[in-house]
Amino acid sequence: MNSMQLPERICSARQKPLELYVFIDPLCPDCWALDPLIRKLQVEYGHYFKLKQVLTGKLTALNTAKPLLAVEQSGLACEESVWEEETIESPFLASIAIKAAELQGKRAGSKFLRRIQEQLFLDKENVADIAVLTRCAEEAGLDKSEFLNDIYSAGATKAFQSDLAVTCEMDVDEAPTIVFFNERIEDEGIKIAGLYSYDIYVQILQEILEEIPEPLDPPSLEEFMQYFRIAATSEIRGVYDWTDSQTECEMKKLLLQRKVRRIHTKHGTFWEYIQ
C-alpha cells in the first residue's frame, strides 16, 4: 500500500475518478454517527474521490430509540436526553450558519459543522442560539466578525437554498444519503440512503470503480490529528485498527509531547491537537 499526505488525499485538485455527494442534516444523530466512517473513507480511499457535502434541511425526529443505537454502534458518544427534549427552536439557523462558515473555506465549514454537532450531541446545547453558534465559530478558528456578517447575509441563505435544490433534484428524502458518481456523465449515480457499516461503502466504491480500490496506509497519528484537529478515541481506534490500550498508549505519547490535550466528557474521551 502506498502513502500520501493527508491533505493531498482529501483536498488535492488533481482529477479523481469519483465524486461523492453526502447529504446530511446537522441535527440528525445518524449523520453524527456517519462522520467517523467518512473520515476513515477519506483517509484510506480519498485519492479516488472528491466529496461534496450537501445540507438536506430534512429534520429527523429526535424522540426515537434508533438514533441512540446508531451512535453507539459508530463509537461516538451522545447525550441521550437530546432526543427526549425539544432543544432546537429554529433548526434551519444551524444550517445557514454552516453555509456562512463555508464562505471562509471548505475546511472551515467542516470544522464548524463538527463543532456544532459536538455541542448538540455531547453537551445538549441549543445550536440555534446565536451565542452558541458564535462560540462554535471561534472554537473552529473562524473569523468571528466575518461569520456574524455572513450568517445574516443573502449569500449564506442562497447557499443553503442551493443545497435544498440539489436535495430535491437528486430525490433525496433521508439523511444521511450518499450518492456515488463516476466520470461517465451518462451513468446514473449509486444512491445509498441511511447508515451502514464501513465495508458497505468500500464495496460501493469497488462497484462504481469496476476495480478493487487500493487503500492507502494511514498517515502518522500526528498528521491525522493536525488535519482533523479533534477526534474521539473511538474514531482514532477505528482508523488505525488499534485496540483500546494501543490507542491510549499512542495518544499519551502525543500528550507527553504537548501536541494534544485530552477532553474528558461523561460519554467518552476526545483529543484536540493544540500545536
Image: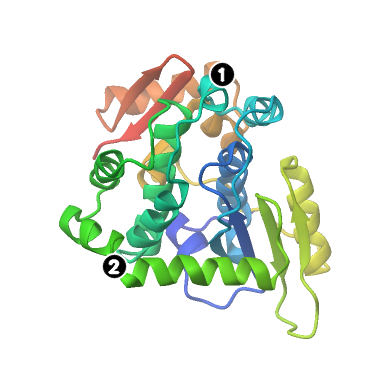
Name which residue lies at 52% across and 61% down: 9
Which numbered tag is attached to residue 153?
A: 2
Considering only vertical position in the picture, is 93 above or below 158? above
Q: Secondary structure at mark 1?
A: helix
Of marks 1 and 2, which one's residue comes earlier in the chain?
2
Which numbered tag is attached to residue 2?
A: none
**The C terminus lies in which quarter of the figure?**
top left
Name which residue lies at 42% across and 45% down: 90
Q: Nearer the viewer, mark 1 or mark 2?
A: 2
Considering only vertical position in the picture, is 166 above or below 194? below
Q: Amino acid at mark 2?
A: Ser
Considering only vertical position in the picture, is 60 above or below 42? above
**Residue 256 image position (x, y, % from top left):** 28, 22
**CA neighbours of label 1 inside 10 A, class few (<14), some (14 to 19), many (20+):** few
Q: Amino acid at mark 1?
A: Asp
Q: Which residue is mark 1?
A: 244
Considering only vertical position in the picture, is 66 above or below 175? above
